[in-house]
Image (cartoon, rainbow, N blue to C red):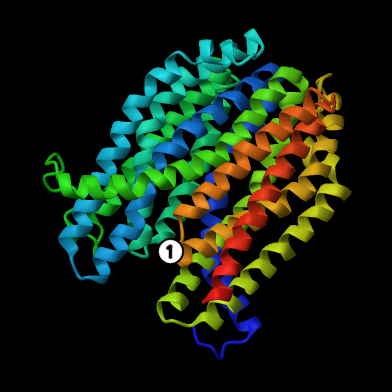
Amino acid sequence: MTKAMTFPAHARATLALGFPLIGSHLAQMALHVVDTVMLGWYGVTELAAVVIGASSFFAVFILGSGFAQAVMPMVAAALGEGDEAQVRRDTRMGLWLSAGYGLLSYPLFWHSGAVLLALGQNPEVAALAQDFLRVAGLGMVPALLVMALKSYLAALERTQVVLWVTLGAVVVNVAINWFLIFGNGGAPELGVVGSAIASVIVQVLTFAVLAVYAGRVQGLRRFNLWQRFWRPDLPALAGVFRLGWPIGVTGLAESGLFQASALMMGWIGTVELAAHGIAMQVASLTFMVHLGLSNAVTVRTGFADGAGDGAAVRMGGLAGIALSLGFGGVMVVAFLVAPVAILSVFLDMTKPEATRIVAYGTLLLALAAVFQLLDAMQVMALGLLRGVQDTRVPMWLAACSYWLVGIPSSYVLAFPLGLGGAGLWLGLVIGLASAAASLMWRFWSRQARR
C-alpha cells in the first residue's frame, strides 16, 4: 500500500482481501437462516419463539465473544514479536475465559421463560422460546470456543479452513433439522427443541474439527496449543480480559438494539414478530457483505497507518465506503422491487398466516432499504477506526447512539405515537443514522487533524 495507489487499485485490493472474509460471514449467517426458514415452514408460533430465542442467545453470545475476538490481535502481535510461546498462552486463556463465560451464562437460559414473560412476551411464545433456549444454551460453550479458534486461525492466516468447516456445518445443520424438527425418517418430531438440538450438535462438531486441525495440522503443531492446556496463566488471562471486555460491550450495544426491537415487536403481535424476524434475517445477510468489507478495510487501514501513510488511509477508506454503498444500492433495489419473492423463501405459502406475514414484511423490507445503508456505514466507520487503533471513544459513541437514541425512538414511534412496527423500524433507522454520522465524523475529523 503506497501513496501512488489509485482509487481503483485500492478498491481492487479491498475486494481481494474482503471476498474470503465475506464468504466466512455469509456461511456463518446461513446457519441461522436455515433455522428461520425451516421453522417458518413448521409453524408461525414456533418461528416467533425461535426469533425471540435466537436473538436472546445471540445477545448473550456477543458479550462473551469479546474474549474470543481479543485472541486475534494478541496472537498477531505475538507472532510479530516472534514469541510463539505467547501465541499459545494468549489463545489458551482466550479459550478459558470463553468457556467460563459460557458456563456462567447457562442459568439465564434455564430461567428464560420468566424473563421473557416479564418483558411482556406472549405466554405461548415465551414457553416455546424457553424450551428452545434450555437446549440451545448448552451450545454456548462450544460456540464461544469455536469463535476463539477462528480468531487464532485467522491470525495465523488459516482462513480457508474456517470457511470450509462453516460451510460443512450448514449442510449438517440442514440434515439434522430435517429429521428432528419435522420428524422425518422415523425421528421424533421435536419442533423448536429439534432445531436447538441440531444447533448444539453442529457447534460441538465444528469445535472438534477445528480443535483437531489446530493441534495436528502441519505448520501449526509447533505452537503446541493443547499441551498442558489445564495450566492457568494469570498474566495472559488478565491481558485477554482487559482487551476482550470492551470488544464484547461494543458488540452488545449494537445487538441490544436489535434484541430490544424483537421484544417490542413481540408486544405488537405474533404475525408481526414473525415478519420482523424474517426481514431482519434478510437485512442481516446483506450486512455480512458490509462486515466483510469492513474487516478488510481494518486490515488495510492498519497497514497504512502503521506506515504513516495518511493519504492511503483516506483513499483506502473512501474505496471501502464506495464498495459498501455500491452493494447497498443494489440491495435497495432488490428490497423495493422483489419483496414478495424474498419473503416467500422463508415461509410455507399454503399456510393461512403466510399472506399476512408477507404483507407486513413488505413494509419492513422497504424500511430495511434505508436501514441497511446506514448499518453499512456505521460498521465501515468502526472498521476504519479500529484500523487506526481508535476503539474506546467509538464504543461510547455507538452505545449512546443505540441505547439513548435508537431504542427510545423506536418505543416512542411505535407506541405513544401509534405507528406500530413501522415506527419501531424507523427508530432503528434513527439510531443507526446517529451511529453512522458520529463514527464517520470521529474518523474523518481525526484524519483531518493528522
Determine the residue positioned at 14% across, 45% down.
233
**Above or below, 338 relative to 153:** above
**Going by the image, does 70 lie left or right of 426?**
left
How many marks the image carries: the answer is: 1
In the rendered structure, which amino acid carries the disc numbered 1?
A: Gln
The quadrant in which residue 6 appears is: bottom right
Residue 255's image quarter? top right
Q: Is residue 388 left or right of residue 413?
A: left
Residue 221 in sight here: no
* Secondary structure at numbered mark 1: loop
The residue where tag 1 is placed is 389
Left or right, 235 with respect to 369, comes to left
Name the one closer to the observer, 333 or 441. 441
Viewer-side residue, 295 vs 337: 295
Q: Residue furthest bottom?
A: 4
Outermost front residue: 449
Residue 52 x/y as whole percent: 60, 24
Q: In the displayed structure, would residue 409 be above or below residue 384?
A: above
Drawn side of residue 416 relative to residue 131, left or right = right
Q: Position of residue 297 (x, y in %)?
A: 54, 67
Between 233 and 354, which is closer to the camera in this rendering? 233
From the top left corner, tell me how far across and down residue 387 is, in percent: 47, 66
The residue depicted at 55 percent of the width and 66 percent of the height is: 18
Above or below: residue 310 compared with residue 443: below
> At 49% across and 16% down in the image, what residue appears?
112
Whether residue 184 is visible here, answered yes or no, is: yes
- Residue at the spot x=84%, y=26% of the render? 417
